[in-house]
Image (cartoon, rainbow, N blue to C red):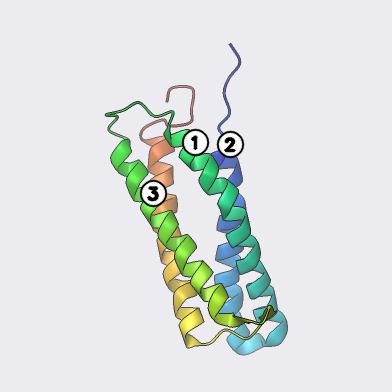
Amino acid sequence: MAARHPLHPALVHFPVACWSLATFADIASLHFGERVWWMGGMLLLAGTALALPAMLAGLYEMTRIPAGSPAMQAVYLHMGAMLGAFTLFLTSLLLRAQQFQLHQPGNASLAFDIAGFLALSVGGWCGGQLVYRYGIGTRGG
């Protein structure tokens, strides 16, 4: 029987990288200006778009976890944190997009970026628990 390779862990690297870099770019734009905040906005857009297939793959992978598994609590924490990160980064993006044009992030957008990064960190830690503690997505899980 061929080994099964879950799609969700392969897809999550893209939104995680985009959102993390967007947060740092937006903060750096306070010093470096328009080129950096424009890049941050594009990274927010890419991360938000790339999160959708990652979330769908995660929902599918969740159906493969046996009912009553002790991993389900970590699954729900992971899912909640990542949905929170998605919502926070989407809000940041919407705050700076007017008439399909990106604008410099204001204080509210920066606050949503930072909150999104914190939620992303919690969700990533929970995802690590699923793999390394519970063996989800591995040959043993």
Q: Which element is circle 3 on? A: helix
* Front disc: 3 or 1: 1
Asked whether the viewer can see residue 6, the reply is: yes
Report the front residue among 85 and 91. 91
Report the front residue among 80 and 28. 80
Q: Residue at x 55, y 56 (%)?
A: 16
In the picture shown, does residue 67 fall above or below 54? above
Distance from disc 2 to disc 3, alpha carbons, whole Å, reads 16 Å
Q: Earlier in the sequence, mark 2 or mark 1?
A: 2
Numbered tag placed on residue 78 in the rendering:
3
Residue ranking furthest to the top: 1
Q: Which element is circle 2 on? A: loop
Q: Residues within 10 Å of mark 3 (few under 14, many from 20)?
A: many
Q: Residue at x 54, y 80 (%)?
A: 95
| Quadrant assignment for the N terminus | top right
Distance from disc 3 to disc 1, alpha carbons, whole Å, reads 14 Å
Numbered tag placed on residue 124 in the rendering:
none
Q: Earlier in the sequence, mark 2 or mark 3?
A: 2
